[in-house]
Amino acid sequence: MPLHNPLWEIAEPYLVATKRYTVPDPTYGRYLLPHHAPTERLMATPGVRHTFRRAFLKPFHDCKTWHEAYNTTEIVHSDQVKLEQAEVEQGVKHGGRWLFYSVWEMDEPEGGWECSGKGRGRDLVLVHGLSDYGLRYSPHVIHFLKEGFRVIMPDLPSYGRSTGVNSYLPSLDLLPAALHVVLTDVVTWDLKQGRKQQQVFLSGASMGAWTVLFYVYRYPPSESAKAVAEASSSDKPAPPRPQVAGVFALCPMVEASPESRPSAIIEYIAKSIKFFAGSLPLAKAVRGNVSDDPRVEEDFFADPLCYHGLLRVGTGLSLLDGMTELNQNAEKINIPIRLIHGTSDRATSHAATERLFHRLPHEDKQFELYEGYEHVMLKVGVDEADDEKRQRVLRDWTDWLLARCD
């Protein structure tokens, strides 16, 4: 993972904000990094098709306030990309702030669709967690494609091939806003191609699960595919609003487990330097606490697109603020939902997830504890027996989705 000198990472945002400096590659070298092996295998799978796209937002320095900068969902440009050097230069010309996402579809497989292809005509959006990026879900995508789903995987701001200092989140408002941008761009892209707007299911793990839960609170689901979002400005028509049908969340970031929350001293230091050194890497956080299988972290560090550094000051404090706000607004998350969490999770608290579940208002809600599972609930096994824990989660996930596709 390309890293700057930490002192430069502290100074650079001020130079950019005052327009004294333009970042030549707003992804800091991530945009052109090679695909990890599981993604290469997915791309080579017969009958699987993919599209890479970017949606552009107004640059931070063109926003009047930080609140506007973090919450804007106005798309100023979007395009289809091939991950070439020229696209980095073109992206800077379009303002230098974009969200990357991939869309995956499958031709009908030999022998027909699984479960009669009940997922056809519906989207499954997979939102990644802290230090990851969208295509980290690559080993599991084929499972949903065979059911007929179209799978969409965004890179959240500052991750993967989206722009921003890697894993620096000065506000978690950036995440639900980014998800809304990607969903809106997908709908707009479909309609321009003469395709119908598709029903959407949202899924995510850890910080990705926080993102989809907070998204439902911040952007309540529309009752009709024809419903539209409020206009981002009074003189522009509102874009089509995504039609979200349900949420399947894995090990959601509702509260940090004691093993992963930084000490009170570290948090005090972080709060003291947040406003002038927010991007400074400081805390270990979940590192070493996501799985008891060392191969999980070995694979993570072998992927150049993952963030391999310490938790940044601003990101850590934003995570704490985001979890607090999510808990304060649990009663406003009103959608069909299933939450699952491992009892041995050392990164996020399964007890906090259960407490949040009881406060959710929708009658179609489910919660299940997976005995002995750690934070990474989708660990790919070395053989069929070792992979059974992952397969159990995938069966649960698929069954829940398909039951709501009637």
Image (cartoon, rainbow, N blue to C red):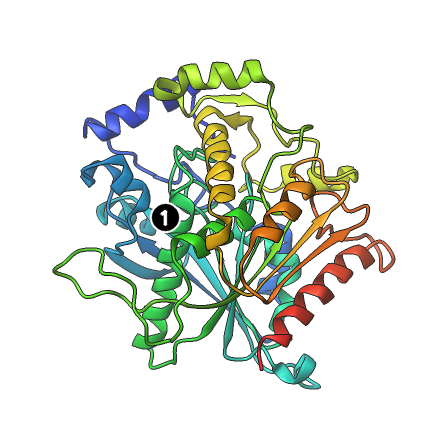
Question: Up-down: is 41 above or below 258?
Answer: below
Question: Up-down: is 45 above or below 172?
Answer: below
Q: Secondary structure at mark 1?
A: helix
Which is nearer the eye, 137 or 29?
Answer: 137
- Amino acid type at circle 1 is Gln
Please say whether residue 54 is visible from this viewpoint: yes
Apparent side of residue 239 relative to residue 139 in the rendered image (left or right)? left
Q: Residue at x 79, y 53 (%)?
A: 381
Apparent side of residue 169 relative to residue 375 in the rendered image (left or right)? left
Q: Quadrant of the C terminus?
A: bottom right
Q: Residue at x 63, y 41 (%)?
A: 352
Please say whether residue 84 is visible from this viewpoint: no
Q: Residues within 10 Å of mark 1 (few under 14, many from 20)?
A: few
Residue at the extreme left of the image, as rendered: 235
Question: Up-down: is 377 above or below 44?
Answer: above
Residue 134 x %, y %: 52, 52
Q: Which residue is mark 1?
A: 85
Which is nearer the eye, 39 or 403?
Answer: 403
Residue 231 x %, y %: 22, 60
Residue 289 x %, y %: 70, 33
Apparent side of residue 1 relative to residue 184 in the rendered image (left or right)? right
- Quarter of the image where one finds residue 79: bottom left
Which is nearer the eye, 367 or 240?
Answer: 367
Q: Residue at x 77, y 37 (%)?
A: 294
Q: Residue at x 76, y 61 (%)?
A: 391
Label total for image:
1
Residue 182 x %, y %: 39, 58
